[in-house]
């Protein structure tokens, strides 16, 4: 029999599979044959769902009956910038309800850009006895009451991370709901909370949890309470301060400096809201051990930043405001040879005039001086093809490159040409580039470059660029590994979209807003491609109240095995097989 | 409602943006409303590009061509990425070659002229597709009824490549050149200073958390070094029974009238019963006047939640005071809001 001759016993296969962690590999395993599919699905413990509407809870549960960890993502990325109206979707509740019934041993839930209610949090708190990790990244819809339920009930909780979520902060009392017997906390991130938490409760919690490695406080935690907290957790590896300001007093300063010095394992610092520069030196003693520094809320000027950064010789990741200026970035390039990731945020994004001396030169310096630089997010007000060319040649190892020239459609400031060639150089030289965000004046030509060279590109963000459908066509037909494409305010329309309809099934999603895609084309796409959900968003009324050739406001297309979703709000229309019936 | 702003683009599309241009900062409906008029005549193939430098109107296209394009636009040819059916080939690839040939003629760059109007002509005339965006951009900018709107219209789409000095000169020119009358590039100028840009929704791409954090920081620094007050002030707006919440940036408005018009537009489709439950939307758009009547006929009132958590009627306190204390907005049915008036009066008495 085939089985005896060619395969291992199930237990052996299962054991082998347990060493395969990557989702992609697991997926490949499951495609080998039916019996491997079966074995794999029973021993899969961790699942990542990049688009919660691509699959449904019943489908997930049916295939993977023994999950311990689930990650779900909801709204499209552009929701971060207010392009997705409230109520669009991404509701966690149906998932949590379903998982509560199916996975009593679930340990980890990670949600990104989803709407989570207090009710959902209560269900989590009461349904999973061994619940360990809750990460709510850029979520919304819940209050501190929901957090209280988690604190009170999850005896084995290790990680509670609310990064950048919008929490209705009713009271800081919830933290006290962690029972005194609770000691298993390893990671706590409450940096997004608006109000003060109960500081005594926090101190007691921190000092009784010996495995606490990550503590990210919110702005409301005053600086003078920080030393106590640090002394209660000298094993901390990652710290996010609260407001970093206080009346300048030598005793407060020395207390703080001492407390920092006591944290020998501290590798990551963040927070630093409302920085009083004279308190910055308190962290100098530990700078040499830092690998990650997030100063992107620290509104201090270049000299202070330079001083700090020049001491961080092991730094791998730096997030900072453009107060650092070109000079500061030059110092960074000279001091931090291990730098892998740089993000420079604008301090005054809506101002008309540049308020700091930060130009393309800063990025060029870093690209020259930091051989390991892989990931860049850079906001600036001017750029040139020459600079981009230099950066590309200096750093062919870039994997993520996101450039935001603040003024839409800014040309090369030296030549007044489009920045096509510059970005072209980036995609041509950086052969492993996976993520790219464009800005500035760009014609269809840049898309030709991207289609030709961006073979490893997985995510592309485009705004105010291109001339015609050809641009979109280049990307859709050329970028073999494209998974996510998000476009706003570009003259891309029906032709490219319809000609590359099949490509869309190989991608996670496509977002197009303020483009030239007509309602008629959306209908056609929806009707012809049953495995895509084609959703049109229009807040001024049903799209069929306008001519078919009218462009739709927003279009979101994603592949799915779950069919059209049923929780759409009134301003979202799905174009599917019977859309004609639905709308008319 | 604010008077419709006319974007008198050089092509002469007089009602290109109509009502939509006075839209809320959040809504993109100016673009879709444009669609009714200007975008129908869009030139998908960019065939008019080579003549566009001279021609003043992309819509100068024969009807026959227009029909052709519309047909082609909605005709679906499915193929693997990269494959082209022979018939289709010429469309895309000739486009490519003509495009490349046209490159030298293709006036992509805004000419380094101080006259923003001229350069925007170039930009918009060149391709019908693009026209929509320039309009959209201007529509957005015009929608921001702070005094900065006019300046920003000049600055936001166009003179990006200009040297800083040139940039500086433009605002004053615009200010001087502006009258109450609408021009192709700007909205009415009110008295406020050109301190900050008009905001295109979601640009630059910065998360709200970061925007709000920076805003709060600069507010705290205000007294110390006199920096301008926070650039953004997002509050949620809800409406009883409406399908969606919106967020508005109160800094985009300088008067209650502006805020009120913007909110009317934002929620208009709900009021008119268009965005009801799925599958049962009304088909006819109500007239503007009907909408006005609905809102002004005390069927709905605008209320806000202040820092103390009390719900008050909007409009009782000076604007500056209002944006300082407003945490959230709500459009309530008039009948529900009856109890609010006395409290509001009392509060403002105690404040003043």
Image (cartoon, coloured by chain):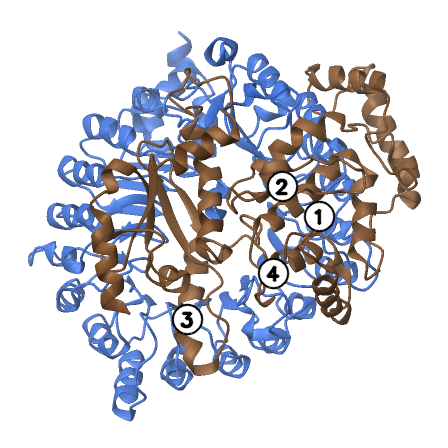
Chain colours: A blue, B brown
Percent from the top left, x then y, of residue A81? 49, 48
- State which mark lies toward you, 2 or 4: 4
Circle 4 SS class: helix
Circle 3 SS class: helix
Q: Which residue is mark 2?
A: A457
Percent from the top left, x then y, of residue B283? 49, 17
Q: Which residue is mark 3?
A: B219
The answer for how far apart the CA atoms under marks 4 and 1 are is: 38 Å
Q: Are marks 4 and 3 on the same chain?
A: yes
Q: Are marks 2 and 4 on the same chain?
A: no
Find residue B36 and report its image quarter. Answer: top right
Find out whether the residues at labels 1 and 3 contact each other: C-beta distance under 8 Å: no
The answer for how far apart the CA atoms under marks 1 and 3 are is: 41 Å
Residue at mark 4: chain: B
Q: Confirm whether residue A481 shows in the render.
A: no
User: Which badge, 1 or 2, is on the more N-terminal residue?
Assistant: 1
Q: Which residue is mark 4?
A: B148
Q: Is A292 in front, or is B340? A: B340
Q: Which residue is mark 1?
A: A427
Q: Crowding at label 2, few (<14), some or many (≥20) Cα neighbours within 10 Å?
A: many
Find residue A224 and report its image quarter. Answer: bottom left
- State which mark lies toward you, 2 or 3: 3
Find out whether the residues at labels 4 and 1 contact each other: C-beta distance under 8 Å: no
Find out whether the residues at labels 4 and 3 contact each other: C-beta distance under 8 Å: no
């Amino acid at each position: 029999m085939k089985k005896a001759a060619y395969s291992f016993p199930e237990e052996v296969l299962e054991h082998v599979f347990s060493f395969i962690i990557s989702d992609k590999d697991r997926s490949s395993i499951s495609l080998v044959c039916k019996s491997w599919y079966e074995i794999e699905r029973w021993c899969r413990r961790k699942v990542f769902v990049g688009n919660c509407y691509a699959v449904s809870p019943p489908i997930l549960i049916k295939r993977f009956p023994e999950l311990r960890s689930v990650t779900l993502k909801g709204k499209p990325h552009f929701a971060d910038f207010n392009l997705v109206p409230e109520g669009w979707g991404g509701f966690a509740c149906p998932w949590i309800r379903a998982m509560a019934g199916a996975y009593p041993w679930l340990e980890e839930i990670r949600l990104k850009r989803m709407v989570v209610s207090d009710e959902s949090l209560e269900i989590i708190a009461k349904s999973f006895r061994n619940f360990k990790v809750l990460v709510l990244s850029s979520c919304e819809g819940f209050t501190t009451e929901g957090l209280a339920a988690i604190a009170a009930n999850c005896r084995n909780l290790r990680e509670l991370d609310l990064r950048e979520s919008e929490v209705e902060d009713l009271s800081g009392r919830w933290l006290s709901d962690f029972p005194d017997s609770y000691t298993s906390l390893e990671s706590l991130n409450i940096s997004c909370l608006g109000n003060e938490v109960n500081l005594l409760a926090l101190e007691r919690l921190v000092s009784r949890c010996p495995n606490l490695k990550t503590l990210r406080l919110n702005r409301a935690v005053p600086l003078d309470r920080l030393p106590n907290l640090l002394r209660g957790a000298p094993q901390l590896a990652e710290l996010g301060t609260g407001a970093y300001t206080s009346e300048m007093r030598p005793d407060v300063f020395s207390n703080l400096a001492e407390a920092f010095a006591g944290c020998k394992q501290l590798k990551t610092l963040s927070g630093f809201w409302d920085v009083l520069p004279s308190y910055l030196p308190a962290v100098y003693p530990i700078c040499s051990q830092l690998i990650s520094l997030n100063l992107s809320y620290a509104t201090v000027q270049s000299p202070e930043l330079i001083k700090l950064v020049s001491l961080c010789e092991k730094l791998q990741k730096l997030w900072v405001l453009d107060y650092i200026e070109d000079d500061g970035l030059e110092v960074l390039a000279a001091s931090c040879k291990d730098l892998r990731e740089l993000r420079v945020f604008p301090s005054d994004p809506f101002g008309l005039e540049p308020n700091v001396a930060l130009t393309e030169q800063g990025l060029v310096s870093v690209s020259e001086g930091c051989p390991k630089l892989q990931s860049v997010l850079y906001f600036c007000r001017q750029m040139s093809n020459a600079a981009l060319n230099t950066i590309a040649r200096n750093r062919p190892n870039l994997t993520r490159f996101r450039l935001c020239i603040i003024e839409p459609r800014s040309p090369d400031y030296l030549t007044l040409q489009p920045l096509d060639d510059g970005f072209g150089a980036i995609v041509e030289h950086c052969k492993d580039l996976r993520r790219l965000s464009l800005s500035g004046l760009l014609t269809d030509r840049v898309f030709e470059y991207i289609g030709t060279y961006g073979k490893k590109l997985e995510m592309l963000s485009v705004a105010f660029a291109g001339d015609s459908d050809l641009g979109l066509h280049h990307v859709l037909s050329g970028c073999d590994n494209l998974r996510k494409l998000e476009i706003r305010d570009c003259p891309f329309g029906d032709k490219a979209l319809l000609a590359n309809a099949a490509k869309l099934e190989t991608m996670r999603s496509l977002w197009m807003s303020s483009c030239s895609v007509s309602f008629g084309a959306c209908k056609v796409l929806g009707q012809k491609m049953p495995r895509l959900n084609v959703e049109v968003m229009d807040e001024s009324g049903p799209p069929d109240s306008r001519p078919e050739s009218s462009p739709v406001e927003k279009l979101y297309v994603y592949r799915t095995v779950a069919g059209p979703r049923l929780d759409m709000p009134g301003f979202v229309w799905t174009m599917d097989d019977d859309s004609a019936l639905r709308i008319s | 409602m604010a008077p419709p702003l006319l974007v008198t683009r050089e092509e002469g599309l007089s009602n290109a943006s109509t009502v939509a241009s006075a839209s809320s900062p959040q809504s993109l409906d100016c673009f879709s409303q444009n669609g009714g008029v200007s975008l129908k005549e869009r030139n998908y193939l960019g065939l008019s590009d080579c003549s566009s430098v001279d021609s003043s109107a992309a819509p100068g296209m024969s009807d026959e061509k227009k029909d052709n394009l519309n047909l082609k636009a909605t005709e679906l040819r499915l193929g693997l990425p990269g494959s082209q059916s022979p018939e289709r080939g010429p469309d895309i690839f000739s486009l490519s070659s003509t495009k490349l040939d046209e490159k030298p003629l293709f006036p992509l760059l805004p000419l380094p002229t101080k006259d923003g109007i001229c350069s925007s002509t170039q930009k918009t005339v060149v391709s019908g597709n693009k026209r929509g965006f320039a309009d959209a951009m201007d529509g957005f900018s015009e929608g921001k009824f702070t005094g900065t709107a006019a300046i920003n219209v000049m600055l936001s789409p166009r003179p990006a490549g200009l040297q800083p000095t040139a940039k500086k000169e433009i605002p004053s020119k615009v200010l001087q050149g502006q009258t109450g009358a609408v021009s192709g590039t700007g909205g009415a100028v009110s008295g406020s200073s050109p301190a900050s840009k008009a905001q295109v929704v979601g640009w630059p791409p910065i998360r709200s958390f970061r925007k709000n954090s920076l805003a709060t920081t600069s507010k705290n620094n205000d007294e110390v070094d006199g920096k301008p007050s926070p650039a953004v002030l997002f509050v949620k707006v809800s409406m009883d029974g409406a399908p969606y919440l919106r967020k508005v940036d109160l800094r985009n408005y300088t008067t209650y009238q502006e805020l009120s018009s913007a909110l009317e537009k934002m929620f208009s489709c709900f009021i008119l019963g268009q965005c009801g439950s799925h599958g049962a939307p009304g088909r006819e758009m109500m007239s503007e006047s009907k909408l006005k009547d609905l809102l002004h006929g005390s069927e709905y009132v605008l209320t806000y939640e202040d820092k103390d958590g009390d719900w008050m009627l909007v409009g009782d306190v000076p604007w500056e005071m209002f944006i300082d204390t407003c945490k959230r907005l709500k459009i309530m049915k008039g009948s529900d809001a009856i109890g609010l008036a006395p409290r509001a009066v009392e509060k403002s008495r105690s404040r003043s």
